[in-house]
Image (cartoon, rainbow, N blue to C red):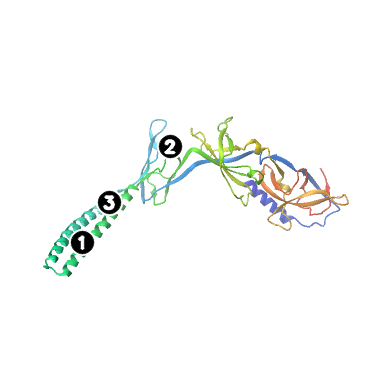
Amino acid sequence: MLAFVLLIAAVAMFGCAHKEPAAPESIPVTVQTVATASGAAGGAYSANIIADTQVDVAFKVNGYVQSILQVKAADGKLRNVQAGDHVMSGTVLAVVKDDTYRNSLAKAQAELQNSRASLSKAKADFSRYTHLLEQRVVSKADYDASKQQYESAQASVGASQAAVQQAQVDLDDCKLKSPMSALVLDRKIEVGTLVAPNTIGFQIGDTSKVKVVFGVPGAIVGDLKPGAEISATVDAFPGQTFKGSISKVAAVADPNARVFDIEATIPNPDARLRVGMIAALHLPNAIQAKNVLVVPTRAIVRPPDDPKGYAVYVADKDADGKMVATLKKVEIGPIVGDQVSVESGLDPGAQVIVRGADIVSNGATINVVP
């Protein structure tokens, strides 16, 4: 991507410097024959290894971190869990100081007991007033007042029960638990850290499978389907090949890089492939064999009538047999070293102007020099 940005900057610079020359009889230029490269870079693509599933484990309550999960270190001593450790689903990763939440729960439970006592009395009074009303001993107004007190006591108990449940949830949330069995990718807290709801404490990921995402040009994307086999190599394990398969193919190209993102999944049961490693991805031989045209990056210019497009100048002969520069608009693909792939607009064997591309114009007489 950096190379692509540099290419755009270079093209912009050349485009700004490009002027219709009050040229000499002929402009000296150097040319290079349009070459081919197998795939976009010999069929190999570089990509970062990421976890198959990655989750941010965040706190739900306020407070100071009181403790962090302890695990055995290589020397047998206990230490705080850290990146690279495996944790099981439901494991308590960290605990927030919970004094306030315990007090809130105790207060809510006490209020629930009071509400239940009030409900018991209101229920007895309502039952008594119901009986007295049937015997015409009390007025309807007294009966209605007793009924209202009873219903109010019932509502109060319901509210108190909800308060207890919420206080219990808040207390339970003081324990930050792992939502799945996974590898700890990062720990962002220490004992004593002040956290709030949504503060991320850990990043964990499932690395029993890993993913890689890389970009391919439009010339070959049509041949890549989900399920197609790929292979990968990493510097950490020289001479070893890891097999995987394509799991997703982008429907549209990146508007800047002009490549299609391909996601591949590689089984990793022994956890040898680590998140952050750089993998070299290799496509099937039938796809690698497809030839893609490439030209030097300095041959790419902006067309005078299209400041957002790309073009090259080709050395050609006019009707009089003189050598002239002919503008060819092109669609470019990914960078290949110090060259850029061309997906359309050029034919193999064309002589593109390399040195002098920033000073010639369409139809200008040129003199090809070594």
| Residue nearer the viewer, 335 or 246 | 246
Residue drawn at x 67%, y 51% as measured from the top left: 8
Q: CA–CA distance between discs 3 and 2? A: 33 Å
Q: Which residue is mark 1?
A: 150
Q: Is residue 11 above or below residue 336?
A: below
Q: Which residue is mark 3?
A: 105
- Tell whether 229 sits left or right of 177: right
Q: Is residue 153 above or below residue 195?
A: below
Secondary element type, mark 1: helix
Amino acid type indicated by mark 2: His
Q: Position of residue 361 (x, y in %)?
A: 79, 54
Q: Is residue 8 above or below residue 86?
A: below
Secondary element type, mark 3: helix
Upstream in sequence: badge 1 or badge 3: 3
Amino acid type indicated by mark 1: Tyr
- Tell whether 332 sits left or right of 27: left
Q: Are marks 1 and 3 in contact (CB under 8 Å)?
A: no
Residue 356 visible to the viewer: no
Secondary element type, mark 2: strand
